[in-house]
Amino acid sequence: MKFQLSAVLILLAFMVACNAPVTDKHAAPLEEPAEEASKQEIKTKHNSEGIVQHYLVLDYNENGQKIRVKEFNQDSVSLWYWEYEYEHDQVSKVVVYHGEDEVSMWADISNTPTGIYYTYEYKKSQLSKITQLTEAGTVLTYSIREYSDGQLSKETWHSASGTPTFYCSYESDEADQFLKGNVFDYNHKLVFYETYEYTDDKITKINRHSKAGNITGYDVIREI
């Protein structure tokens, strides 16, 4: 149970970071053998002093669709990874696995499912709901997405009982590029916000700011 609780806390943080979203399509269902990546990106997460705290490796198939994400610590030890399942050309489920960190190896659970997974629901081809569940199907949390003129404008996370816990609001420019993501608590008070930098219309840097505007860290995304 303690492993599952840790997974919930860490994985929830991963899923709800107010990063400008990208919809993945057309990846092969994972009932088939794991697909080899034809392209990879690395997302390094830095503190305010520029020191890498941990990093993510994102695998894509030959058509450019995401098929898995792996998280590593500073020593390049895998902590968790996410496998993507698809249905009707849309992400339908994300299954979370233990990595090869010392605790997982000691407990003999490395590279096995954590018992946590996410399901995705759509309305008119737009992602409308993400639900976090246990292996038994018990709902832990869920998010509801709202759109304005076809662009994501807000995502609200709820407890299993339906109580809103926090939400992200997004600001975009006239070209529909995300400029800023604001994270608010359940009392509608700003907790922190993120700003996005682009190279060739693709997000390559995410800056995290305190509510006072100070940079507390940043992510750099690049192809490897």
Image: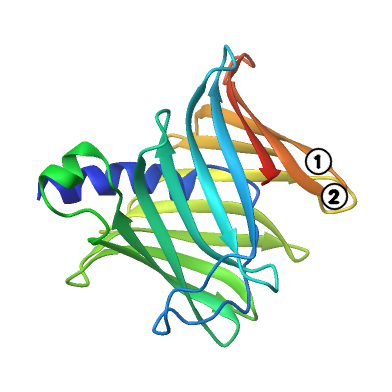
Image coords of residue 91 (percent x, y): 53, 74
* Left or right of 144 in this view: 204: right
Q: Is 174 in front, or is 111?
A: 111
Q: Which amino acid, mark 2?
A: Asp
In the image shown, does 67 or 76 lie closer to the viewer? 76
**Which residue occupies the foreground of this view, 27 or 209?**
27
Name the residue at 60% across, 14% down. Answer: 212
Outermost residue, bottom direction?
Answer: 88
- Quarter of the rendering containing residue 166: top left
Q: Position of residue 186 (x, y in %)?
A: 41, 39
Q: CA distance from mark 2 to mark 1?
A: 6 Å
Up-down relation of residue 61 to residue 105 (above or below): below
> Which residue in the protein does label 1 denote?
198
Give the number of marks. 2
Dot 2, crowdedness within 10 Å: few (<14), some or many (≥20)? few
Percent of width and height locating residue 18? 56, 43
Q: Judging from the image, what secondary structure is the residue with disc 1 in?
A: strand
Q: At 63% across and 49% down in the image, what residue appears?
A: 41
Toward which corner of the image does residue 133 lie, by quadrant? bottom left
Q: Is residue 128 above or below residue 111?
A: below
**Percent x, y for residue 190?**
53, 28
Q: Do the residues under discs 2 and 1 have CB atoms within 8 angstroms? A: yes
**Residue corresponding to mark 2:** 201
